[in-house]
Image: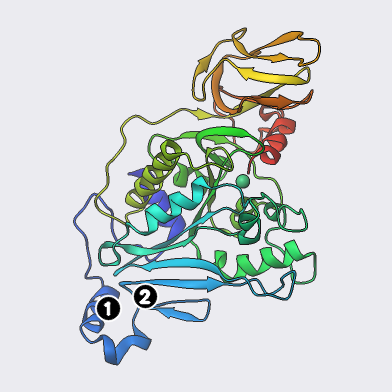
Amino acid sequence: MSVLLLIGNALASEATHDSDEPPIPQSQTDAGQERSLEDTAEAEDSLPGTLTILDAQIPPGTVERLSWSATELFAGVSIATPVLVVNGNREGPTLCLTAAVHGDELNGIEIVRRVMHNLQPAELSGTVIGVPIVNLQGFRRGSRYLPDRRDLNRYFPGNTKGSAASRIAYSFFNDIVSHCDALVDLHTGSFERSNLPQLRADLRNPKVVALTEGFGSTVILHNTPAEGTLRYAASSAGIPTVTLEAGGPAELEIKEVKHGVKGVQTLLYTLGMVKKVRLWGESEPVYYRSSWVRANRGGILLTDVALGSTVREGDLLGTITDPMNNASTRLFSPYSGRIIGMARNQVVMPGFAAFHIGIETAKVPADESGEDLNLHDAEQNDRLSE
Ligand SMILES: [Zn+2]
């Protein structure tokens, strides 16, 4: 219940009901809305709850597919990126879902599709804005990056006079993100690494904490966002944002997709935006600390653990074999914890981050977490995925 209160305060001053109670559709505004809906043809322009976005007016109770185009593009050709909007019949917060900011991260695209196309505007309180492929140019080339090799997720909130990446980021941030009361940015691991479905969240921010508590059984990793990420920029603008990591790049992984869908649907329920949902029971641990175990030699990495498995200090994680002289070295876990991210089997260079271990520690006090958090690793985490 405290979650609902916190989120209610944090996300939407106009949110009117608690989802455990019967719907209260007849606040003063809602009464006006009900009346208008019977008379849509005459009153469409003045309907309360109409969303104006990307030069379109979207009345309550409707679904719309819009296009967003960044103002500055590489070849003078406009690339229209689809934006899906479901505007509910009842008032409530605006939740945004963004995927494929990195163009090779496919799981989030399918998560957004499944969530958006299951929403019924007549039964929705608030609005959901879904952008399945933010970095359409990267997606078309199967690349994480923009065509100039820049990482779009290092340029938010962007500006109108910087690099192409800055301008694209600025356009997206102002045209779309500024409408959000809360944002879930969907990612996967990078460079042949896969992540256990997990939320990356700055747990020093109470609004973000409230958001993480809405996802049901999903691992939470405390992680201060790197400057330039969408999560950093949106949170800095007062829009609580979490990153949902699920799986690895360049593949559609249905198990991870289903986990993500269930998490977001649970969030919609927790936010009081939908009524019916399959609720999860046990919550997953919160990891206030994590660390990467790196390859000490180059060679062929074969892993001996599975994503999500629990390890103890000294457990074997994998073996790296030099393909030339056949010498093998074994990687052992320096920590007790849980494998929350790991490399797929592949050829690695010395120093390659191979296993990401979530370490359960005492709760980190707000704003005093620098030393305990191992900030170097926290930064590294951001580079490796989000
Ligand atoms: Zn990513």
Q: Tell whether label 2 touches label 1 (CB within 8 Å).
A: yes
The image's colouring method is: rainbow
- For residue 44, above or below residue 185: below
Q: Is residue 120 above or below residue 150?
A: below
Q: Nearer the viewer, residue 284 or 119?
A: 119
Relative to 57, say whether 65 is above or below: above
Number of residues whose C-alpha sits closer than 10 Å to that of mark 1, classed few (under 14), some (14–19) or many (20 or more): many
Mark 1 lies on residue: 33
Q: Label 1 is placed on what type of residue?
A: Gln
Name the side, left or right, on which 273 lies relative to 315. Answer: left
Label number found at residue 49: 2
**Residue type pointed to by label 2:** Gly
Residue 78, how many percent across, how many down?
65, 75
Q: Tell which of 332 and 10 is nearer to you.
A: 332
Q: Position of residue 173 (x, y in %)?
A: 62, 65
Determine the CA span between mark 1 and mark 2. 8 Å
Q: Quadrant of residue 34?
A: bottom left
298, above or below 83, in the image: above
Sequence-first disc among 1 and 2: 1
* Residue 75 point in image, percent of width and height: 74, 72
Q: Nearer the viewer, residue 337 or 349?
A: 349
The N terminus sits in image quarter:
top left
Residue 187: percent from left, percent from top: 56, 45
Quadrant occupied by the C terminus? top right
Left or right side of 315 for 48? left
At a point 39% along the width and 41% down the height, the residue shown is: 258
